């Protein structure tokens, strides 16, 4: 038969704390809990009037009641119900201890709430309340019985017999009381210790062995100072003197305490001076292990120090955009001190012309999305606009729920300025390159036309020796024109001004035209240039001029590095989805480590065999860019001493 659920009423105005406690209690597999929640004292008192509640989890600071009055109201309305105080600060903890003195059963710090601790605390509090009721009932019964006996003594002559029976009943009650208290102490999660005025331990509860590892015979009889960390000894000695100074003094302190295994743990001790109390004559100290809490506090402090010393602005905010933390770098970046912006909306940093940006960011964070390197604009306290790069991450609680966001900001104003300067320098360079190239083309065209007229005999007969010189000069003019075209095209690509006019055309006639022109040059270098292509039309969407330029750059590259008597094959294959073009030469080949550099800007590999000459190092880079513009790909197959093959493909259909 399963146990009846323990009915718990949580009076707490923070819904997240309620959800966390609800989730924590639901994990208890031994005792079932029926948890109810109200967020106001008035609502809680109304519910308590209905009855059926075993225990109240009470936050002292509520919208309609604050501090000790909150506890007193609940205790007055439902004195039969056990109460555990929930605290979240040192000040709250002092109030909680006062509340315990006035009738509360226990207190818990909210950060310590875990399944086992919370469940055990609730059970112990209910048991303590039950024992208190039983004690009060016993006392009431005793008083009633004594009164009855007194009345009987007044009416009867057997006064002595009635007195003896009354004493016997009192002795039994005291025996039961002692048994109840011993059971409570022996099963407590804390250590209950009694010490004399010199600090000698005269009693310690059985939990000493479980928490500190000491058997009682090794612990009792020694001074508590023997177990205190040397760095904390002065504080504890002072605390103990203050505690002993006056009867009824109540003090709490934290220190490091030596365990049986030689390790140190953090303990919280709450002492009450009862040296003058009859039958006690000792200082009662309740000791609790707070090592986990101190470790968590240390970790939080370490993280806070890292955040505060960071060179990047780090801001934490709620899901409503309210700032809750602000490091020193944020002060430097935005000009606001932390005190000026904590509890303010993050929107104070956003320019008026970006009203929706914060909400869009918060919506993405609520979905669990992390925002990386968002470049935007923010406003400093002095009104100055600055460029920043933001990385924003959701913050989750222990149960994985998103409860806020952290924002890391870096000032990129100088980087933006440098980028603009680079872009301006690039623009000026491109304009200069374009201007110079155009200025060179005009005299080059005139010179080439003049040489052509002379070679064709239009201005008179030309001797054979003169003709050889003129042919050489004409070839160098062609080479110069090629270099100028490369530089001009590169400048256009760098500036993003290269114009491409695609049209559906049959590329076979264009290939033949290009081949015929390059065949003459190959023959002059005594190189065998061949074309292998289908004898049917192949229609592609291309820019005719740019397509010819791709072929020209690859064929020119092959002619540069193919020796006299060598061979170059230009091959075209019509495939299902693409058209494959290859330019194969019998040149010196390319080392494997150099292949990946071929298409980089200004790369000139020193392949000495063949009639190659130094160019701009842009031809293959331009060819690759033009092929990509047409939706194609290019790669190289080569081996030293066995020639090279450049292969590129163009898709048959393009958008």
Image (cartoon, rainbow, N blue to C red):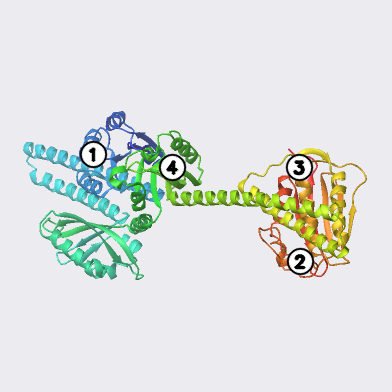
Mark 2 residue crowding within 10 angstroms, few (<14) / some (14–19) / many (20+)? many
Position above or below: 526 against 2 = below
Considering depth in this image, is 286 or 335 the residue closer to the camera? 335
The Cα–Cα distance between marks 4 and 1, rounded to whole angstroms, is: 50 Å
Q: Position of residue 452 (x, y in %)?
A: 82, 53
Q: Foreground mark, 2 or 4? A: 2
Considering depth in this image, is 233 or 434 the residue closer to the camera? 434
Secondary structure of the residue carrying tag 2 is loop
**Residue named by callout 4:** 377
Position of the C terminus, as image quadrant, is: top right
**Residue named by callout 3:** 543
The Cα–Cα distance between marks 1 and 2, rounded to whole angstroms, is: 88 Å
Position above or below: 81 against 289 = above
Q: Position of residue 548 (x, y in %)?
A: 79, 48
Q: Earlier in the sequence, mark 1 or mark 2?
A: 1
- The residue lying furthest to the right in this view is 535
- Decide: marks 2, 4 in contact (CB < 8 A)? no
Secondary structure of the residue carrying tag 4 is strand
Q: Earlier in the sequence, mark 4 or mark 3?
A: 4
Q: Does residue 440 appear to the left or right of 367 in the view shown?
A: right
The Cα–Cα distance between marks 2 and 3, rounded to whole angstroms, is: 30 Å
**Residue named by callout 1:** 71
State whether residue 123 appears in this view: no
Q: Does residue 599 appear to the left or right of 20 in the view shown?
A: right
Q: Position of residue 134 (x, y in %)?
A: 25, 43
The Cα–Cα distance between marks 4 and 3, rounded to whole angstroms, is: 42 Å
Q: Position of residue 634 (x, y in %)?
A: 75, 53
Q: Foreground mark, 4 or 1? A: 4
State whether residue 289 appears in this view: yes
**Residue named by callout 2:** 590
Residue at 8 percent of width and 40 percent of height: 153
């Amino acid at each position: 038969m399963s146990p009846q659920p323990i009915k718990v009423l949580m009076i707490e105005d923070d819904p997240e704390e309620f959800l966390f406690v609800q989730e924590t209690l639901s994990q208890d597999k031994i005792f079932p809990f029926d948890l109810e929640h109200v967020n106001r004292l008035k609502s809680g008192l109304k519910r308590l009037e209905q009855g059926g509640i075993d225990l109240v989890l009470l936050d002292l600071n509520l919208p309609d009641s604050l501090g000790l009055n909150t506890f007193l109201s609940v205790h007055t309305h439902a004195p039969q119900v056990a109460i555990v105080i929930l605290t979240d600060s040192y000040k709250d903890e002092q109030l909680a201890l006062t509340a315990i003195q006035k009738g509360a059963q226990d207190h818990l710090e909210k950060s310590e709430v875990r399944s086992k601790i919370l469940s055990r605390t609730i059970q112990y509090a209910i048991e303590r309340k039950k024992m208190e009721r039983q004690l009060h009932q016993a006392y009431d019964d005793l008083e009633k019985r004594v009164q009855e006996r007194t009345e009987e003594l007044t009416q009867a002559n057997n006064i002595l017999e009635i007195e003896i029976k009354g004493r016997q009943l009192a002795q039994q009650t005291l025996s039961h009381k002692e048994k109840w208290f011993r059971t409570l102490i022996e099963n407590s999660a804390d250590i209950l210790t009694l010490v004399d005025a010199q600090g000698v331990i005269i009693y310690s509860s059985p939990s000493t062995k479980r928490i500190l590892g000491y058997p009682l015979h090794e612990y009792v009889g020694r001074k508590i100072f023997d177990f205190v960390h040397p760095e904390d000894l002065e504080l504890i000695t002072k605390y103990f003197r203050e505690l002993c100074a006056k009867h009824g003094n109540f003090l709490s302190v934290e220190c490091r305490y030596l365990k049986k295994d030689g390790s140190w743990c953090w303990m919280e001790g709450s002492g009450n001076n009862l040296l003058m109390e009859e039958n006690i004559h000792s200082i009662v100290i309740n000791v609790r292990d707070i090592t986990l809490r101190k470790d968590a506090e240390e970790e939080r402090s370490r993280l806070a120090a890292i955040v505060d010393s960071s060179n990047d602005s780090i801001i934490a905010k709620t899901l409503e955009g309210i700032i809750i933390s602000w490091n020193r770098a944020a002060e430097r970046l935005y000009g606001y001190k932390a005190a000026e912006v904590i509890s303010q909306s993050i929107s104070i940093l956003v320019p008026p012309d970006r009203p929706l940006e914060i909400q869009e960011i918060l919506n993405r964070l609520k979905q669990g999305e992390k925002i990386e390197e968002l470049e935007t604009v923010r406003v400093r306290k002095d009104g100055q606009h600055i460029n920043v790069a933001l990385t924003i991450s959701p913050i989750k609680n222990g149960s994985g729920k998103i409860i806020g966001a952290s924002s890391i900001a870096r000032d990129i104003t100088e980087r933006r300025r440098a980028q603009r300067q680079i872009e301006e320098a690039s623009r000026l360079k491109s304009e200069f390159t374009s201007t110079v190239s155009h200025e060179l083309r005009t005299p080059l065209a005139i010179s080439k036309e003049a040489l052509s007229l002379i070679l064709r005999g239009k201005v008179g007969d030309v001797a054979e020796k003169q003709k050889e010189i003129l042919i050489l000069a004409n070839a160098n003019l062609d080479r110069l024109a090629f270099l100028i075209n490369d530089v001009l095209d590169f400048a256009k690509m760098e500036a993003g001004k290269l114009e491409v006019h695609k049209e559906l055309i049959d590329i076979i006639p264009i290939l033949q035209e290009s081949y015929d022109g390059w065949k003459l040059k190959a023959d002059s270098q005594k190189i065998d240039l061949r074309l292998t292509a289908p004898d049917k039309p192949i229609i592609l969407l291309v820019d005719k001029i740019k397509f010819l330029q791709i072929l020209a750059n690859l064929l020119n590259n092959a002619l540069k590095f193919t020796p006299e008597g060598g061979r170059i094959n230009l091959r075209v294959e019509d495939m299902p989805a693409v058209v494959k073009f290859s330019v194969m030469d019998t040149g010196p080949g390319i080392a494997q480590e150099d292949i990946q550099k071929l298409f980089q800007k200004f790369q000139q590999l020193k392949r000495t065999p063949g009639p190659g000459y130094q160019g701009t190092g842009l031809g293959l880079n331009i060819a690759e860019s033009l092929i990509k513009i047409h939706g194609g790909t290019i790669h190289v197959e080569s081996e030293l001493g066995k020639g090279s093959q450049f292969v590129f493909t163009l898709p048959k259909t393009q958008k």
